[in-house]
Image (cartoon, helix red, strand yellow):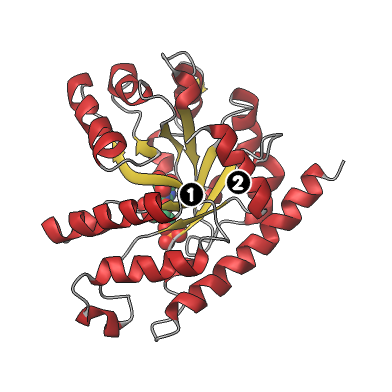
Amino acid sequence: MTTEKLISEIKKKQSFLCIGLDVDLTKIPQHLLNNEDPIFAFNKAIIDATHDLCVAYKPNTAFYEAYGLKGWKSLEKTITYLNEKYPEIFTIADAKRGDIGNTSSMYAKAFFEDLAFDSVTVAPYMGKDSVEPFLAFKNKHTILLALTSNQGAFDFQTKTIDGKEVYKQVLETSKTWKNAENLMYVVGATKAEYLGEIRNIIPDSFLLVPGVGAQGGNLQEVCKYGMNASVGLLINSSRGIIYASKNEDFAEASAQKAALLQKDMAIELNNYFKN
Ligand SMILES: O=C(O)c1cc(=O)[nH]c(=O)n1[C@@H]1O[C@H](COP(=O)(O)O)[C@@H](O)[C@H]1O
C-alpha cells in the first residue's frame, strides 16, 4: 500500500488506530476452542467487528509462532482474509527481524511476497546491510525500532555515544540508506516526551506507536508531540482492545473499546487540521 492511500484512509475513517492481533489461547473466549482454528476464528470476528474503526492490524508473529505449524497457518489465513476482504487496511507483520543481507532478503520475501503484508517491523542493531534488503520492495514499508516502549529501552537506546543518543543515531543514519522513503519508525507511547526531538530529525515519517492501553501510554500526549501534516501516526493497542470480554460478546466488546479510541483520534485530527 502507498503512504498516500494510508493517509487517505486515516482521513476517511477519522482514525489512525492499529489493532494488535496478539492472540493468546488462554485469554480468548473458551467457546472458540471448539473451532478447528480458534486463532483465526477469533481474529475474523475481531476484524469483522472493528475494521471500520481502525486503519491497520498488527499481528505479532510471536503469538502465532508459539503454536508451531498451526499458528503459522492461522497467521496466513488472517493476512489472506484481510487482503481479500478489507484491502484498504494497512497490515503490519510485527516480527522484529533483521540479519546479514542475504538472510534479511529471505525475511523480506517471507513477509512481503509469501504472506503479502504491507510492512514488517525490523530491528536496526545489525545496521544498513541488514535493513536495505527490506527497503528494496516498492510500496512495502519497513518499520524500524527507534525508541521502544519497554523499560529495557534505557539499556542501550537512550545511551549517549559520540555525543548523541543511540536512538537518534538510528533515526539519522537510517535516513541515508537506499530507499529510505520506505521507512517508518517505532516509538513507544510510553516515551511521548521524546517525540518533539524525534520529529526534529524525522519530521515527515510515519511512526508506529505501541503502548497505549495495557502499557499506560497516553494518546493525547503522543498526538501533541508526534502528529504532523500527514498525520504521521499509527497508534497500536492490542490487549486493551482484543481482550475486552471473554464471553460470547467479545467482538462487540472489542469494537466498543476501539470506538472509544477512534472518537479520541477524531478529536485530535479535528484539532490539528481545523485551520
Ligand atoms: O514493535 C512493536 O509493535 C512494539 C514495539 C514496542 O516498543 N513496544 C511494543 O509493545 N510493541 C508491540 O506492540 C504490542 C503492544 O501490545 P499491548 O501492550 O497489548 O497493547 C505488542 O505486540 C508488542 O510486541
Q: Residue 175: where, in percent of width, then height?
A: 49, 18
**Tag 2 secondary structure:** helix
Reply above or below: 204 against 88.
above
Is residue 31 something that shows in the picture? yes
Q: Is residue 164 left or right of residue 71?
A: right
How packed mark 1 is, by other alpha carbons closer than 10 Å (few <14, some 14-19, many 20 or more), is: many
Amino acid carrying label 2: it is Glu
Quadrant in the picture for residue 265: bottom right
Horizontal side, residue 103 vs residue 126: left or right: left
Q: Are marks 1 and 2 in contact (CB under 8 Å)?
A: yes
Q: CA distance from mark 1 to mark 2?
A: 8 Å
Compare residues 212 and 64 and report the one nearer the observer.
Answer: 64
**Relative horizontal placement of residue 93, taking residue 174 as reference (left or right):** left
Task: Name the residue beneath numbered marker 1.
Answer: 89
Label ID, residue 9: 2
Residue at x 39%, y 38% (from the top left corner)? 119
* Label 2: how many Cα within 10 Å (few below 14, some 14–19, many 20+): some
Q: Residue 199: x and y, percent?
A: 63, 30
Q: Give the residue drawn at x 18%, y 21%.
A: 102
Secondary structure state at the residue bearing disc 1: loop
Q: Residue at x 50, y 22 (%)?
A: 181
- Residue lying furthest front in this view? 84
Mark 2 Cβ and ligand 1 under 8 Å apart: no
Name the residue furthest left.
Answer: 69
Tally of numbered tags: 2
| Of 99 and 273, the residue lying toward us | 273
